[in-house]
Amino acid sequence: MEFGGQPRYLGLDVGDRRIGVAVSDELGLIAQPVLTLTRTRKRRNDLRSLARLCRRFGVAGIVVGNPLRLSGEPSPQTTSTQAFAAELGSLTGLPIHLWDERLSTHEAHQVLYEAGRPGQTHRRVVDQVAATIILQSFLDGNQRSGDPDS
């Protein structure tokens, strides 16, 4: 944390095929898209790639989109994502913050349409836009509460 800044966070939108990645700025105010990681056949390789990004950006915590059903109930994807997040936390030693991601991918598509991006180009960036939305929601929630662990 240079210059007394806020801790930086890595935001993730974890899917079966891709992982969208975003990072917060040094002030802890704004989430920025980083990349879309294409999943490999070996989960460990995906985890190591994310651990490298954590070191590269000097993050203090990881925000993982928690895929709940619209009703708020867990889904089969919830269990898989939470297990992935737990493994990532063990590997990096960083705190994991599960954050409600309901409708984040839908919102990401809306953002891309409003930005004039044709639908066929969304696939390359929609996951990182969703990760940015998840992380920004987390940052905004913590600014209101003042507690990064809420």
Image: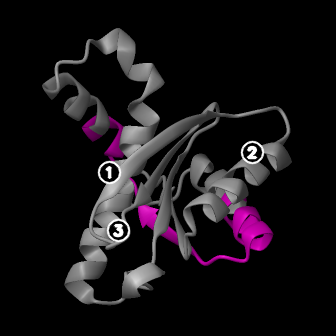
Query: Which is more N-terminal, label 2 or label 3?
Result: 2
What is the three-letter code of the residue carrying label 1? Ile
Would residue 81 be found to the left or right of residue 31 on screen?
Answer: right
Task: Give me the residue at 42% from left, 51% from top.
Answer: 69
Vertical side of 121 occupied by 58: above or below: below
Q: Quadrant of residue 60?
A: bottom right
What is the three-letter code of the residue carrying label 3? Phe
Indicate the quadrant containing the C terminus: top left, top right, bottom left or bottom right: bottom left
Vertical side of 99 occupied by 44: above or below: above
What is the three-letter code of the residue carrying label 2? Asp
Residue 93 visible in the displayed image: yes
Query: Picture coordinates of residue 99 (x, y %)?
Result: 43, 65
Query: Picture coordinates of residue 55 (x, y %)?
Result: 66, 64
Give the extent of the magenta segment.
Answer: 84-107
Residue with the mark numbered 1: 133
Q: Nearer the viewer, residue 99 or 27?
A: 27
Distance of label 3 from label 2 (alpha carbons): 23 Å
Q: Quick one: which residue is furthest to the front in this view?
A: 3
Q: Nearer the viewer, residue 124 or 81?
A: 124
Distance of label 2 from label 1 (alpha carbons): 21 Å
Label placed on residue 138? 3
Query: Picture coordinates of residue 12 (x, y %)?
Result: 52, 53
